[in-house]
Amino acid sequence: RATGRCDLPLLSAVAPGKTGGRGGAQNFTDVPQGPLTARHVADLCVFPNVVCGVEIDGAGLADWLEMAVSLFHTITPGGGEQSLIDQVWSGHGFDVIYGLTYEIDLSRPARFHPDGSLADPQARRIRDLRHAGHPVAPSDRFVVATNTYRANGGGHVAALAGLPRLDSGGVTLRQALEDMLSRGCLPEDPHAQVFRFAPLDGARIRFDTGHAARAHLAELGPRDVRLGEDQAGGFLQVSLAL
């Protein structure tokens, strides 16, 4: 329920709705340049989730992100090309929290199992977690806009259990996005970097994606990006140096 904590910094957690996998090589969102339509909004908001907010401290934020990045395999420096994504995890569990910046150290083991239980209590992949350029302390408090699926336990994020809730009055993600777009509310910097992978000498990561990704590879920045052979099911394999 609503807490009235309007004095706290507002962040937003976003996860992809379509991530390939069992859905196939076409199970990705690709909104072309030009006028937006209701179909594009529906493609971005696949599930009928309702917007809500949660009040959380810095320690909880860090664990929320640790859960998200636990879907990646541990990568060995100097180990050459290695698979990035552990397929036992669901892609729509990969939350990115906007309003923060952080680095992901894939040389560290995952902190959590897919069911939300601790895999390694000492493991920490999230480094240099910051808000507005300042380090996030464990006791700092925030409000994070998310959805009822996640807040109610979807994705098994233990850090969200029992948190104070802000109710949106039943507004769905799709409704919120349509309203924002109709009012011309666009991000100030849509290409602002939220996270980055920590450099690991002698290591490359590979993953499968849809063929439409070819048009967006330059957005990965000045990295050594390579395309592999077409994979089973029509996926495009991409690898890049860390």
Image (cartoon, rainbow, N blue to C red):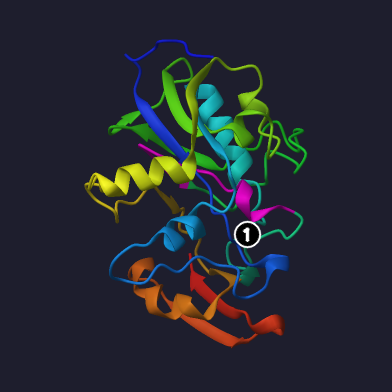
222 lies above or below 88: below
- Residue 80 placement: quadrant: bottom right
* Residue located 46% across and 53% down the image: 198
**Residue 142 falls left or right of residue 134:** right
Query: What residue sits 61% from the left and 29% below the top?
Result: 151
Query: Residue 32: where, in percent of width, then height?
Result: 36, 72
Depth check: give the residue in front, 119 or 35.
Answer: 35
How many residues crowd around disc 1 within 10 Å: few (fewer than 14), some, or many (20 or more)? many
Instruction: Report helix, strand or loop for mark 1.
Output: loop
Coordinates of residue 61 in the picture (x, y in percent): 51, 29
Tag 1: amino acid = Ile
Q: Residue at x 55, y 24 (%)?
A: 60
Q: Is residue 194 visible?
A: yes
Quarter of the N terminus within the rendering: top right
Residue at the extreme bottom: 229
On the image, the x and y values in percent for residue 131 come to 34, 31
Residue 174 at x, y percent in the picture? 47, 46
Q: Is residue 209 magenta?
A: no
Q: State the residue at coordinates (70%, 81%).
A: 233
Left or right: residue 119 versus residue 135 is right
Residue 81 in which image quadrant: bottom right
For the magenta stretch, what is the residue range?
89-103
- Residue 85 falls in which quadrant of the image? bottom right
The residue singled out by tag 1 in the image is: 75
* Residue 55 seen by the camera: no
Looking at the picture, does residue 93 appear above or below residue 56?
Answer: below
Q: Which of 105 and 238 lies nearest the eye of the viewer?
A: 238
Number of labels in the image equals: 1
Decide: is 226 above or below 49. Answer: below
